[in-house]
Image (tube, rainbow, N blue to C red):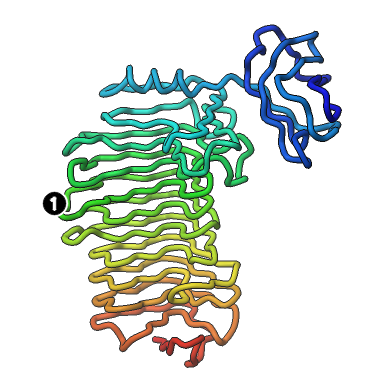
Amino acid sequence: MTSGSTTVTSATIAFTSADVGKSVRVAGAGAAGADLYTTVSSVTNGTTAILASSAGTTVSSAWIRVATDDTAAIRNAITAAQYGALVFPKGTYFVEELSAAQIFLITKSIRLWGAGGNFEGSWIAVSKRTVSTADYFHYYPGQASVPYFEMGWLCICPEVPDTYVGGASAIYLHSDATSQIQRVHIHDNWINGGASMAILQQDTDVTTSTATFYHSVIERNTLRGGAGDIYMVNCGDSISIHQNNFGNKGYGIYAKHVAGAAQLIISEGNFQGSASGAIFLDACVQATIRNCQIEQGVTQTAGPLGIVTLNNCASCKVTGNNFNAFAQNNCLALAGTTIRACIDNNVFSVANSSLYHIAYTTAAPSGNQNTPFNNDGYTASTLGAVTTHTF
């Protein structure tokens, strides 16, 4: 494209009359080199089209996207498929939202199934310019004890994968005093959130019931969110997070039990920790972290310096994990009033002698057990303003 012109040419895109009205993005062709967003006004031939807006910058060999916005069609399909299943055949589904708080609001039980959680399966491609406060799939049932929500075999991410732009959280599980969620199953997906989380669960009113977001499974997903992968606030009983791959933006998993809830299992996960750490459990009861590969290759900058942290937790178990700590990170931190932590059969590796395999920031929590393997290279010292100790 040439600056000031509405003509775009491409040797490979193969324009047809069916492209008129479609959404267009031309990389770098907007004002001051920003991307140009517009629509197709007319098609001259297979290599040339006229756009509704002119270029602000001359570009060549630029990336171009021409797509039908499927947002309205998918919204209609979700409404029609409530209490049943909506199947996305193999292909790419382009969606864009410029103002609403969510792209897709789901208020009833539903199953969403694709043809494979990869770019060659069923890809929900979110426009780069989707407003950063819009969640992709916002599940808010608006009633008590909704039986189920399932999402499987889908690729859900921005139109340029791993850019962390275009929208907020990929999946937002939202409950409150009148909206309790149970039996969620999220499995076999590639999920990349925009500016926020891959999966966000939040109970915004915990005064009436602890029975919210419980008996649920998140398994076999690849998760990468702009601010974190799984973030659960005031979650309920019996949640299993199993065989997922986690990215390195924010927490891999942050979880806080609502008062009275228990039983969280995190197993066989593959974590690449971020500056926030890999796993942070806050006020969790009867949680288990087992058989995970947990690695931290960047310097941690906030909170108790452990790539896994148990904060104010009770009766939790950390077992059979492989920790590998780089930079300035301890492997496991026990913080606050954490009690009755059972720590056994883990492999701890640290980068230098100033780091700890297991550190705690108060007196040794009561009832802790530790059967360490490969406990090499730690000394008693002070990190920052927090006095740490080691087993």
Q: Where's residue 170, x and y in %?
A: 46, 41
Q: Where's residue 351, x and y in %?
A: 59, 78
Q: Nearer the viewer, residue 105 or 231?
A: 105
Q: Where's residue 271, x and y in %?
A: 50, 58
Q: Residue at x 58, y 44 (%)?
A: 165
Q: Residue at x 42, y 38 (%)?
A: 101
Q: Secondary structure at mark 1?
A: loop
As displayed, is residue 48 above or below residue 368? above
Q: Nearer the viewer, residue 275 or 116?
A: 275
Q: Residue at x 38, y 28 (%)?
A: 112
The quarter in which the N terminus is drawn is top right
Name which residue type carries label 1. Thr
Name of the residue lying farthest toward the front = 4
As displayed, is residue 283 above or below residue 61? below
The quadrant holding residue 14 is top right
Mark 1 crowdedness (10 Å alpha carbons): few <14, some 14-19, many ≥20: few
Q: Where's residue 152, x and y in %?
A: 41, 33
The quadrant holding residue 387 is bottom left
Name of the residue lying farthest toward the left = 208
Q: Label 1 belongs to which residue?
A: 208
The quarter in which the C terminus is drawn is bottom left
